[in-house]
Image: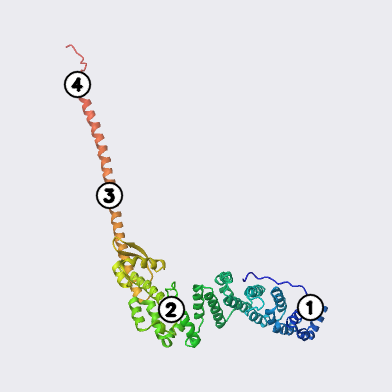
Amino acid sequence: MPAPTNTLLIEGSFSELAEEFAQYIDTLRKEGSLQSEIAPLLEPIRQQEQSEGEPDLKQHDEVLKKLVGAAAVLNGAPEKEIIPSYNLLIHLIHQSSDTDVFLPRICAYLAKPITTSPQFGPTLAISILTTIFNTLSNDDSSRYHVLLAIVAVIRQSGSGYAFEALKPKLTTQLPTWLSAWELDDEEAQKLHLAIADASTAAGDDGLAQSHVMQALQLIPAAEASKPAARDLAVRALASALRRPAVFDFTPLTASDAVQSLRSSDSTLFELLEIFTSDTLDAYEAFVSANPLASISGGVLAEAADALQTKMRLLTLTSLASGTPSRSLPYATIASALRVPAEDIEVWVIDTIRAGLVEGKLSQLKQEFLVHRATYRVFGEKQWAEIQGRLMVWRRSLEGVLDVIRSERERFAREGMQAAVDQEAAAAQGKNGDKARFGDRRRIQQPQQAAQPREVEAVAE
């Protein structure tokens, strides 16, 4: 698989290696025409090499045209010789003035079966293509053609191992590669669709849907009604409806190509609108009037069960998001989903697992208490609902603040009163001490008066 850029080292001058390769091709073809064809073209190149002058890459290109044109025969070479012979050709191509002239043709050869190794041919082809990819600089647009060939081989071979090895690169590095290669919209779309086909062949519907959507977004508005755009829009829409994990249809409704289905595939577009914002009742009425097998060539003919299951989950999501009290009785759920009472909890749990709602089931109260619900569409009605809930929340917060303010004021009043009382008590205690001290003095004074006094007697 594509890895950090490296260098392919093969000893020998261009003229020597080109002659050796031509000789090998003649051996495979059992004729000697190629070697004789390039002999006059190699003569001036040899002279330059002997004089150690600057090589004329244009002369290299003339030789490479002959070599690359005959290289298709390498797919019939003995298994052990396929990789070395292609490596030699790759080395020669890197000495051209423009590798973009030759590498796409080599990639086309490798995308075809290797006839001498039916079992290991895809592995050999991927190995060679990976070598080509890694010997090119990160911003070399030739890497685009190489990656297309790698993806084509993986899709044709159905190699799950090769796909799993490539998948991390597609997830982490593909956006960087596309930016560096500066592809136009048509080229980028072609690559995304190739990856989607390979993903589908490997059983990865999620990655396939992702790249189909990326390809859909690259369709210019001016071309949205063209047949190719219509086919891609139908493919993307049908895939999104069938896939159990897709519940958000906003990217589809935002696409000009999908909007063009209003006129070309009105029934399919009507179904999209039901899945975008409507409920199970509308879906069942639609299916009664429009059998799935008759919609857009039967793209949904085998998806009846999957569509009904998804519609039930979406209907429960709408119920949860539109319930002001946040409490959904089991009876309401059973009626909306048209399921028996004993299956209600299973459907609620499935909706929670899908990430559409969060909440708590109460068997005692026979209700589902909604904690969070996903809005399927978000417009004026949803903004109004959020505004209403924010107002309720605001009033609740104002009530809480009033209680806190009242308690704070009461606490302050009680604190002030306690301080006053303490001060008064302290003052009273001080006055009491003075009073008691005065009493002791009054008690002691009479005792002093009651003591006998000595009186001096004076004779007359």
Residue depth check, mark 3 versus mark 1: number of the one nearer the observer? 1
Q: SS for tag 2? A: loop
Residue depth check, mark 4 versus mark 1: number of the one nearer the observer? 1
Is tag 4's residue or tag 1's residue first in the polypeptide sequence?
A: 1
Residue depth check, mark 4 versus mark 3: number of the one nearer the observer? 3
Mark 4 = which residue? Answer: 450
Q: Position of residue 354 (x, y in %)?
A: 41, 68
Q: SS for tag 4? A: helix
Q: Position of residue 397 (x, y in %)?
A: 32, 62
Residue depth check, mark 2 versus mark 3: number of the one nearer the observer? 2
Is tag 4's residue or tag 2's residue first in the polypeptide sequence?
A: 2
Q: Amino acid at mark 4?
A: Ala
Looking at the picture, does residue 285 appear above or below residue 435?
below
Mark 3 = which residue? Answer: 414
The numbered mark at residue 302 is: 2
Mark 1 = which residue? Answer: 16
Report the coloring of the rendering: rainbow
Q: Amino acid at mark 2?
A: Glu
